[in-house]
Image (cartoon, rainbow, N blue to C red):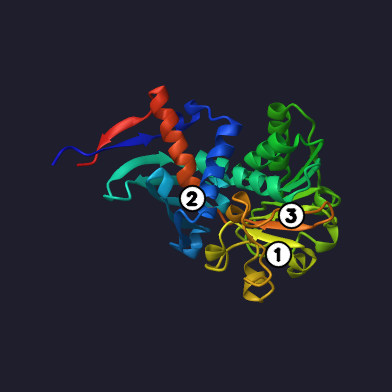
Amino acid sequence: MEPVWFTFLNASDVEQLELTDIEILDAVEGGLRAQGLGETVIEPRVHLMPDPAFDGHFNVLRGYIAPLALAGVKIVGDYVGNYRQGLPSEMALLNLFDPSTGMPVALLDATALTEMRTGALTALGARHLARPDAKVLGHVGARATSYWNVRLLDRIFDLAEIRVHSRRPESREAFAERLQRELGKPVVVTEDWKSCVEGADIVVEASRLERPEPLLRTEWISPGSLVVPYGTNSAVELSLTDVMDKIVVDDWGQAHAGPFGALRAHVDSGRLDEVNLHGELGEIVVGSKPGRESADETNLFWHRGLSLSDIALGAAMLKKAEERGLGQKLRFA
């Protein structure tokens, strides 16, 4: 048998790629387009919880994108208390395979990739479901993905007002300072949820709760706004879905499977099902379902994270790494 090699991209390699906002958005949108056209296979994420004492779990995401000729499996650790040890709360590895032979193609440090693709999914959902003239963002949460939410939303909407809040004052202050430095515009730090989200055109709920708690009140949501909740534990009231004109998910198969997710209780209670679900974002991207149709629509986009986004962005990273001569070739067999 001829030697089998695969490419390894570590965190430094990924950083040196210097992916642009447009490259990230285009790659993730390509994955959504393939999904909307039925050219993918996606299986609901599964979870490994090693021990309740560890205060964390692993997410395992799996998928296949035919146009890219790649299958992928990503394993991401989700450990809320890692900040106490100076570690990121989410660390990930993405494995890419040749779907026709099962042979490995690449192994990537997917920590930054996860942050980028999550932000891209938030921004792309807003592109189709928020008002085109949306200018005020209320963002709860200062986790690693939060930066990319705000950065890519600002890329699309050129926001006039950015408000941020998180549980720990030091995290929200540091988050705001980074955004101000890199976006070149002021950021308002709020001390509570209400002042962060009330009256905002786009509301993103990316909090890091240890248990479900209804901290985001439905009464604070303005008509005509877009709400994007994606935390592991729900921070929204059951009544949130009652005020929505359109409810969109990234993938219904995994939205109603598994124990976690911001709208888990809404699915379990029957408030969210296939009857009142408007559709998946991929369907909107390819035009088989409409996005926002009027200025006064109040919409919700719930994304749990797509393996397809990981694979699509991983493929874009591999291509750019080859062009720049980055990464290592490792022998598999």
Q: CA distance from mark 2 to mark 3?
A: 23 Å
Residue tagged 3: 227
Which marked residue is nearer to the observer: mark 1 or mark 3?
3
Three-letter amino acid code at disc 2? Leu
Judging depth in this view, the residue of 214 and 160 nearest the camera is: 160
Give the Cα separation between the discs numbered 1 and 3.
17 Å
Label 1 crowd (10 A; few <14 / some 14-19 / many >=20):
few
| Tags 2 and 1 touching, CB below 8 Å | no
Q: Which residue is mark 1?
A: 213
Q: Residues within 10 Å of mark 2 (few under 14, many from 20)?
A: many
In this view, the mark in front (2 or 1):
2
Please state which amino acid type lies under the numbered disc 3.
Answer: Val
**How many other residues sit within 10 Å of disc 3, few (<14), some (14-19) or many (≥20)?**
many
Q: Is residue 87 visible?
A: no
Q: Is residue 265 left or right of residue 38?
A: right
Compared with 113, 320 (above or below) is above
User: Circle 2 is placed at which residue position?
Assistant: 308
